Amino acid sequence: MRRTGPACLFLGVALCVVLSAVCHGAEVHSTVLDNGLSVVTCTQPASDVASVFVGFRVGAGIEQPVGIRALLHEHNRARVEQLLAGDNSFAGLASHIRHAGRVQWRVEWDYLQMHAVCTSTHLEEMLTLVRAGLFASDVRSDLLEKGQRRLEEEYQALARRPAEQAYYLFREAMLDEVAVAGAQPVFGKPERVAQITVQQASDFADKYLQAANATVVVVSPLPGEQALRLVEDALGAVKRGISASSVARSCYPDSRVRVGGSPQARLATVVVGVGLPAPGEPGFRVGQLLYHVLGGPEGRLARDRSLFHTLALNLPFRLLAQRTPLTVLPVAMSNCPHLAIYAECAPNAVRNVDEQLLRHINSLGAGAIRDEELQQAKQKLINSRARTMLTAARLAVHLGRMQMLGLPPASFADGTAQIEQLTVADVTALAQTHFQNHYVGVQMPSSSGQD
């Protein structure tokens, strides 16, 4: 059963708050079942697609031992794959997934995420699969071992991805000591993950991968009342569990640089960035705006020919569309967001590249931004938000991530109005407040690294 309250919008027994109107009038409803499970539903009648997001508000800050979140997520993925392959009760859903898409899994520093798309006729079957795959009480040794092998492969593949290594070094430079676990690869080191026992995994899942930390989002053509009833029937009896604590994270109080070395790298890879306000704070949207000011084919970095010369890659400009040595990283929805730039360069150009990238970031604090530039970035940000609303899949993930971070979904009209009201003064204020310290991660083409 759901929690009851004074304003019942449907079924006569549930307090279901209308959070906002999104996607051209489609209402988003949110409720909490008696077992603590958060349920968000949104009706999109334009197609027969149903999109299901399942998230657990279980962050890296409570990992004991380190890597157990990713391991359990891999365990559950293996269980879902096995159910789809061998359980006849999911035969129809399995056939649909093989032809129309796949189940997607992500491990973030702040939460765990599963996302799948099916037709509305398969929605009940999908929710039954969620219960059997993600909320089952047992942890199986064979599936745990399979997960350990997958994570070991992922860790080994990291050695072939210098850009990702540089990003982890950047996060290590940025995050304070309380949050240092959040700077490490989410899949953990193989030697530590291999030591996690079935009992440890079972205890962790029994505490945290339960209803009190979970959110289920359903975007479908079904009326919200019907979708909510399906979720309640499938997951209303799931164990509550223990609410996971949120570890506060903040940027390091001083500028820092972290340097590593990789024998796989031929070029140096650099990530330079600054911290941003958390989602829900006014400055976060300004940070999203600056992503569009700096990045893209019409952004500041692409127009700075001297910067490309500093990279010392000897690439003709006609080839830059095929091979881009500069990328502004998207501003992630997380509890510790950042504005960062990734660059590839010759090893002897690292210092100059660092200075050039910081020149662009620091100029924002001096109000060096043209009105035309600002208006163009606003329109790009509005368009990117509009694309989120176009499909059930994108909308479900967006609503799920908002819920994971404790944020109500803003209506499209309200969000657009907020973006249109942003000014050069807002950009300047954000830069002067949050860009005083910068953080740099550098991965050099060598066999060892140093700080």
Image (cartoon, rainbow, N blue to C red):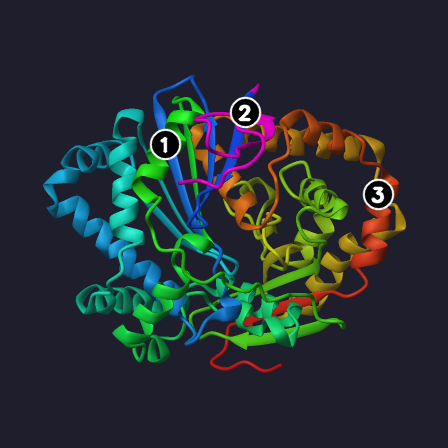
Of circles 2 and 3, the one toward us is 2
Q: Residues within 10 Å of mark 1 (few under 14, many from 20)?
A: some
Horizontally, residue 4 falls left or right of residue 433, namely left
382, 312: nearer the viewer: 382
- Can you identify the residue that label 1 sits on? 229
Residue tagged by mark 2? Answer: 27
Whole-angstrom CA distance, mark 2 to mark 1, is 17 Å
Is 223 or 67 nearer to us in this picture? 223
- Quadrant hosting residue 208: bottom left
Element carrying mark 2 = strand
Mark 3 or mark 1, which is nearer the start of the sequence? 1
Tell me which amino acid carries mark 2: Glu
**Quarter that holds the C terminus:** bottom right
Of the two numbered discs 1 and 3 in the rendering, the one whose residue sits closer to the viewer: 1
Give the residues in magenta: 1-25
Q: Amino acid at mark 1?
A: Arg
Task: Using the image, determine if residue 219 lies above or below residue 3.
Answer: above
What residue is drawn where x is 73% and y is 65%?
A: 438
Q: Residue at x 10, y 40 (%)?
A: 88
Quarter of the rendering occupied by the N terminus: top left
Q: Name the residue located 14 percent from the left edge and 37 percent from the top edge.
A: 91
SS at circle 1: helix
Identify residue for label 3. Answer: 426
Residue 348: where, in percent of width, then height?
Answer: 63, 71
